[in-house]
Image (cartoon, helix red, strand yellow):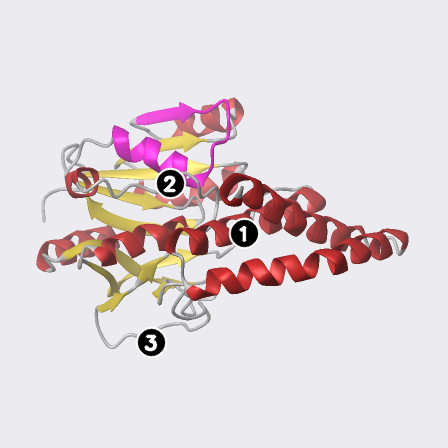
C-alpha cells in the first residue's frame, strides 16, 4: 500500500454542522496529516480558526446556506482529485491503519464500489454499520461478521470508494435527502448496477449513532423528526416500493389525530411532544406539496 500521506492517494471529506470543537478535534487527531476537505454547513468561522490553528487542512469550505448532508458530501467529492475518497462523519473515529485495510480490500474486491469498516460504540461494543435496504427489512440487526460481508446498504458515516468510479457512474448523493436515507439511496443505486458494498471485518471505526449536535432541545427534536420523516417519504417515493403506499395512507389517517394531540399536548404543557407532532405533520405536507401535487 502506498503512503496515505501522498496527496495523490486519498482525500477524506468531513461535513460539519454545529459540532463542538472537542468532538471534531478527536476525529481529526486520528487522521491528521492526511489530505482533508472540510465542508462546514454552519459557516462557523470560529471553529475554522481553531481547526486550522492545530491541523493542516487541504480545503476548508464555509457554506453560507446549509443545503444538507448530501449536498455537503457531493461538494467535497467534486473537489477530490485523488485515487480514493473517504467520506467521514465528524463523530466517527478511524485510525490510519484501518483506512489502509479498507483501501487494500477495495483493491482486492474488484466488483465493489464501496467498502466500509465495522462500527463500534464508545463502549467498544458492535454497533450498526450495514445491512438490508429499508424496503427489505428494518435496520435493527447488528451484523456479527465471520469475515468481510456484502451488505445491501452501509452507513454514510464512513465510506471508502474509488473517486473516478463514483464520478463516472454519476453515483453521487441525491441532494433531495437533507439528512437521512441518502446513504441507503446511494447503495441502492450501486446494487442496481450489480456492484457490491462490502463491510470489512478487520477495519474498525468508533461511531456515535444518531446524535444531533444542536443544543436547543426543541430545535433538536424538530430537526430530527422533520428531516427523518420527509427523507423517509422521499426515499420510498423514489423507489416506489409497496411500503411507500402504506406510509402515505398511514400519514393521511393520522392527520386528524395529530391535530387533536397537538392541542391536548399544548394545554398539558408537553411542548416537546407538540414540536415532535408538528414536525411530522409539516414533513408530510412539505413532501406532499413537492412530490404529489
- Residue 149's spot in the image, x, y percent? 23, 69
User: Is any part of residue 156 visible from this angle?
Assistant: no
Name the image quarter holding residue 264: bottom right
Determine which residue is flagged by label 2: 28
Query: Mark 2 or mark 3: which is in front?
Result: 3
Task: Identify the residue shown where x is 34% and y is 42%.
Answer: 173
User: Dots 1 and 2: beta carbons under 8 Å?
Assistant: no
Left or right: 138 in relation to 83 = right
The span from disc 1 to disc 2 (Cα, nearest Å) is 28 Å
Q: Is residue 70 magenta?
A: yes
Give the structural element (helix, strand or loop) at label 3: loop
Q: CA distance from mark 3 to mark 1?
A: 27 Å
Q: Nearer the viewer, mark 3 or mark 1?
A: 1
Residues at marks 2 and 3 touching, judged by CB atoms closer than 8 Å: no
Label 1 neighbour load within 10 Å: few <14, some 14-19, many 20+: many
Magenta stretch: residue 281 in it?
Answer: no
The residue that disc 3 covers is: 144
Q: Quadrant of residue 110?
A: bottom left
Residue beneath the point at 47% across and 32% down:
67
The residue that appears at 19% across and 31% down in the rendered structure is 81
Q: Nearer the viewer, residue 275 or 207?
A: 275
The range drawn in magenta is 59-79
Q: Nearer the viewer, mark 1 or mark 2?
A: 1
Q: Residue, x 28% and y 35% (percent of image)?
A: 77
The kind of secondary structure element at disc 1 is helix
Q: Report the number of discs.
A: 3
What is the CA distance from the residue labelled 2 to the residue labelled 3? 28 Å
The x, y position of residue 263, in whole percent, is: 84, 52
- Asked which secondary structure carries label 2, the reply is helix
Going from the N terminus, do you reach mark 2 or mark 3 first?
A: 2
* Residue labelled with disc 1: 228
Amino acid at each position: 500500500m502506498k503512503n496515505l500521506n501522498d496527496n495523490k492517494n486519498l482525500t477524506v471529506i468531513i461535513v460539519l454542522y454545529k459540532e463542538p470543537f472537542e468532538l471534531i478535534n478527536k476525529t481529526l487527531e486520528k487522521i491528521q496529516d492526511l489530505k482533508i476537505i472540510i465542508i462546514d454547513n454552519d459557516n462557523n468561522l470560529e471553529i475554522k480558526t481553531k481547526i486550522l490553528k492545530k491541523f493542516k487542512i487541504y480545503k476548508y469550505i464555509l457554506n453560507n446556506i446549509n443545503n444538507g448532508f448530501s449536498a455537503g458530501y457531493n461538494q467535497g467529492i467534486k473537489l477530490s482529485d485523488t485515487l480514493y475518497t473517504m467520506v467521514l462523519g465528524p463523530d466517527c473515529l478511524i485510525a490510519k491503519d484501518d483506512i489502509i485495510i479498507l483501501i487494500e480490500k477495495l483493491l482486492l474486491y474488484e466488483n465493489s464500489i464501496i467498502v466500509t469498516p465495522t462500527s463500534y460504540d464508545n463502549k467498544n461494543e458492535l454497533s450498526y454499520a450495514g445491512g438490508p435496504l429499508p424496503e427489505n427489512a428494518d435496520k435493527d440487526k447488528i451484523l456479527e461478521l465471520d469475515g468481510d460481508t456484502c451488505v445491501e446498504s452501509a452507513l454514510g458515516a464512513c465510506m471508502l470508494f474509488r473517486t473516478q468510479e463514483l464520478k463516472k457512474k454519476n453515483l453521487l448523493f441525491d441532494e433531495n435527502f437533507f439528512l437521512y436515507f441518502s446513504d441507503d439511496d446511494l447503495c441502492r443505486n450501486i446494487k442496481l448496477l450489480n456492484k457490491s458494498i462490502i463491510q470489512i471485518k478487520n477495519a474498525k471505526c468508533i461511531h456515535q449513532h444518531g446524535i444531533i449536535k444542536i443544543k436547543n432541545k426543541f430545535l433538536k427534536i424538530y430537526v430530527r423528526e422533520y428531516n427523518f420523516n420527509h427523507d423517509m417519504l422521499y426515499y420510498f417515493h423514489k423507489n416506489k416500493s409497496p411500503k411507500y403506499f402504506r406510509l402515505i395512507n398511514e400519514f393521511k389517517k393520522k392527520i386528524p389525530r395529530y391535530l387533536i394531540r397537538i392541542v391536548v399536548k399544548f394545554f398539558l404543557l408537553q411542548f416537546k411532544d407538540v414540536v415532535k407532532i408538528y414536525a411530522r405533520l409539516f414533513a408530510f405536507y412539505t413532501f406532499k406539496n413537492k412530490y404529489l401535487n
